[in-house]
Amino acid sequence: MRQQSLIGIQNKKRQGLFVRCLYQPSGMTLIEVLIVVTIVSVVGLSVYQSLSSGLRVWERHQKMVQEEDIIIFFHKFERDVRNIAPFSLIPMTGHQKRIAMPTTVFTAADIKRGWGENIYVDQLGLVEYYFDPIERSVYRRQVNYAQAVKNLFGRTQKVLSDVEEFRIRYYFLTEEGVTYSSSIDNIIPVGIEVKVAYSDEHGQKEMEKIINIPLQG
């Protein structure tokens, strides 16, 4: 009897131990939760700082690219203006958002004049620049002399994008001095001013250039 009682007591102890093991909570302690939260916070802060730094670098790069594009545009525009042909039968016209000028263009040669195919030469033609405020872009297109007389234009090329404002002024020499106008019609000015405005993280910025037209004749 005594041996059976001892065996019964041992069995009850084993069952109690099993029940305690079975129902022992398996959740995280408060210290473990705090450690996990700290680790996640540190990792999140590091990721945010990396993304923020990368975004600032990207914005600075975009700003530099925009300024470089405007400088390249000024160079092309100046080249076309300085090559204006004042005695051409192609009229020079323009206003604040558009200009068309007779100038030297590098385009396909006229086959009827004895040139072969796929040959490009410098010749008299027409170049047009215009600003599209809806697309916020500046476009350029050119044609040779024969196409200009027939008012035929070919492919249009985008030369600037993300432009907030675009303005052209035309300068003339009068008896009172130098004055400017917002438009021209079949007359060659002594100078042209072009202004381009764009926006960055600091607000709107402007770049402008004044080009003198060589007097001929």
Image (cartoon, rainbow, N blue to C red):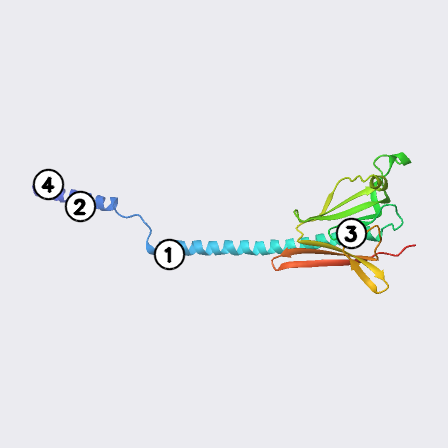
Q: Picture coordinates of residue 215 (x, y %)?
A: 88, 57
Q: Earlier in the sequence, mark 2 or mark 3?
A: 2
Residue highlighted by disc 1: 34
Amino acid type for the residue under numbered disc 3 = Phe
Task: Tell me the element at label 4.
Answer: helix
Q: Residue 73 carries which label?
A: none
Give the residue drawn at x 17%, y 45%. Answer: 13
Q: Name the residue under label 3.
A: 77
Residue 191 found in image quarter = bottom right
Within 10 angstroms of label 2, few (less than 14), some, or many (20 or more) residues? Answer: few
Quadrant assignment for the C terminus:
bottom right
Give the spatial CA distance, label 4 vs label 2: 14 Å
Q: How crowded is mark 4: few (under 14 residues within 10 Å), some or many (20 or more)?
A: few
Q: In which quarter of the image is residue 57?
A: bottom right
Residue 146 or 96: which is nearer the viewer? 96
Q: Earlier in the sequence, mark 4 or mark 2?
A: 4
Q: Residue 13 carries which label?
A: 2
Q: Which residue is the site of mark 4?
A: 4
Residue reaching furthest bottom? 176
| Mark whose residue sits in front, 2 or 3 | 3
> Which of 13 and 47 lies nearest the eye of the viewer?
47
Tell me which numbered mark, 4 or 3, is placed earlier along the sequence.
4
